[in-house]
Amino acid sequence: MTTASTLLAFVALAATLLLVWRQSWRGRVRLFVVQSCVLATLAVVIGLLAHRPALVVVGVVFAIAKTWIIPRVLHRMGVGSPLRRVAPGRSEGLSVLAAGALVVVAYVVMLPITGVVAAGVPTRSAMPLALAMALIGLFVCVTGRDALGQVIGFLVFENGVFALALLATYGLPGLVEAGAFLEVLVLVLLMEGVLIQIRREHDSLDVDRLRELRG
Amino acid sequence: MIVLLLALPLVGAALLARATGRLGTGVHAVTAGATLVVGLVLAVDAVRGDVRLGLDGFLRVDALAGWMIAVIVIVAALAAAEAPRYAAHGGHRGFHALLHLMVFAMLLAVCTDDVGVMWVAVEGTTLASVFLVNFERTRASLEAAYKYLLICSVGIAIAFAGTVLVYFAEVIRQQTLAEHVPNALRWTALLALAPSLPPRVLELAFVFLVVGYGTKAGLAPMHTWLPDAHSEAPAPVSALMSGVLLGVGVYAIARFKPIVDAGAGAGFSGRILLALGLLSLAVAAAFLWAPGNYKRMLAYSSVEHIGLVSLGLGFGGALGVTGALLHVLNHGLAKSVLFLLAGRIREAYGTVDLAGVRGLLAALPFTGRAFLIALLALLGLPPFGLFTSEVMIFAAGFQQGHPWVAGGALALLVVAFGGLLHAVHGMMLGAPPAVAAVRGSWMAALPIAAALALLVLTGLAWPPGLADALALAARAVTP
């Protein structure tokens, strides 16, 4: 179980790092789908190995939501926006370097906890990888100069937190998990509505144009 | 009873999604009134020490929850009384429905014993209010809605990670992942286990929780969405957001504080809350000296007051927590009244620029006077309740051995005081420009007057039982 979960979390982190490096919107959405697929597999694998049928269901629902519904909405969001760099003025190299530093940060934060006290949890060694994914997502979200970049950063971040929940506690109780899924879906749909309006108003999704409110 | 309280706004919202016109206004009024009455009855029971359970312990209203229910239903009633003026403007039928949905989500957040469901409910408040922030559909409100949705969602996802870590601590303690512990995320269960939970995990969890729920609460430096959303939303929504939604964020932090304190020692959570409280005061004080827009001014003042509440919780002790809880109510009353009046001022003057509003006292006698009185209350002058709760918070600071923090906060408060007073001086006096007539009636004046009277009550003459109720509620945070 330890090996399988660490391996899958590592693959997901690799997809996340590639996502930082890729600058085109389609490429990013594709990598987000890859990351989500790996995490859904992780949920199913943990569910099978730990004999938790509920977790297999979570994995399947996660797969439907994150690799089918949300990417469709994301593609609709991206329609019409020019194929330009999502993070202009920054080199991909620097971003990936920063993301690498965040992996180190995640290990520094998590190791004291997972190394000493968490002996009863077989998947604990992958927890820093999940935190790293979350931190990188946050980084993409904060540095995105474009609404699309910020949204995908948020979704990657959300996936990282989901992975953390899987690895730390085999997911949360069903009601909370269901509520969280539902809200991510509603949020993405609301975000689509807002972005469509922003594009209609400003003819662009560049967040630098959002400058009505200052001070 | 709890189920009834939660069902009322939910059913009301469902009906209002269909009903329009006079029928819609009627359903809205009945829903708001019934929620107020049921909420107050439940709250009075709870703060007397009668812990109510519902749905097999899934819902649990203790004194702290009862206190928050009271704040929510009172401010919601104030906002609801003003809502019909705005619902007509936008041409949406969703205004009333979303307002009640927001109230439902807030009530669920404080009524549930499950910290996971509390998280779902707090996130629900964001989703319900995004459309309300963007109700006027201008460029500025659109920008505010985007920032609000993005920043609060990120914040709330961080709080989710914190909740996961708390659960992780519990799993480590039980040494088993074989089966889900039933009711593992119940607050009561966590509190009972807290002394034996691993301290390092709890500390990390608390950092995530404070950043996450602190974003919803509007603590600096996570406050950046707040001035935009609160100033662009229609007045009743601003009143609800500033008056209670921020308090619900603080409530979530307050629920986790005793768990972390029991497991990791009291100093850790207190230091974080003190630091964020001071920073919030500093940010607000700096801005309040140069506001251009009176709704933004009120929004920044919310950052200031949430900073004070955070200081009260951080100082701790019975006095600090009591002061913080009382301050949540007082601030909720004063700020919601101010936002509602600001909406009327905007309607009359047609601008939200401070420079455009002159001679308020002469132009709009009732609105102007009420605005001045509520503002003096907000500034913390006696005989209003904010004076009392601020004195309690600062007394707690000196009593608990934080004289430097309390002194610094007091200095920042004076700076903010000066800034607000300066701005309002300009609004009140001077020659008024031509002003559009505002429909005024005793119906519109009544809720405002009632809220101001309540503020005098919490400041000057505590009704019998208030002190006991507050002490009981504070015991949930500092056992």
Image: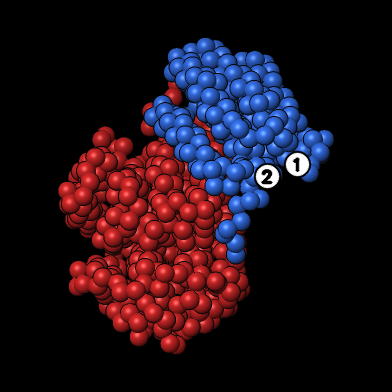
Query: Is there a contact, CB below 8 Å, between mark 2 and mark 1?
Result: yes
In which chain is the residue bearing label 1? A
- Mark 2 sits on what residue? A145
Q: Is residue B455 left or right of residue B38?
A: right
Q: Nearer the viewer, residue A189 or A65?
A: A189
Picture disc at residue B182: none
The tag earlier along the polypeptide, 2 or 1, is: 1
The residue beneath circle 1 is: A88
- Name the subunit of mark 2: A
Q: From the top left corner, tell me how far across and down residue A169 is, in percent.
A: 53, 28
Which residue: 65% across, 38% down? A149
Q: Quadrant of residue A7?
A: top right
Residue B387 in the image: x percent, y percent? 41, 77
Residue B249 picture location, percent across and down: 45, 52
Q: Position of residue A135 (x, y in %)?
A: 66, 38
Look at chain B in the picture and name its colour.
Answer: red
Q: Is residue A33 visible?
A: yes
**Spatial distance from mark 2 to mark 1, Cα to Cα?**
8 Å
Instruction: Give the colour in which the image draws chain A.
Output: blue
Query: Is A209 drawn above or below residue B422 in the view shown?
Result: above
Residue displayed at 55% across by 72% down: B291
Disc 2 marks a residue whose amino acid type is Arg
Above or below, comparing residue A4 to residue B341 in the picture: above
Instruction: Look at the numbered disc 2 and give the secondary structure of its residue.
Output: loop
- Give the quadrant of the N terminus of chain B: top left
Residue at 40 percent across and 73 percent down: it is: B349
Q: Quadrant of residue B388?
A: bottom left
Residue drawn at x 39%, y 79% is B434
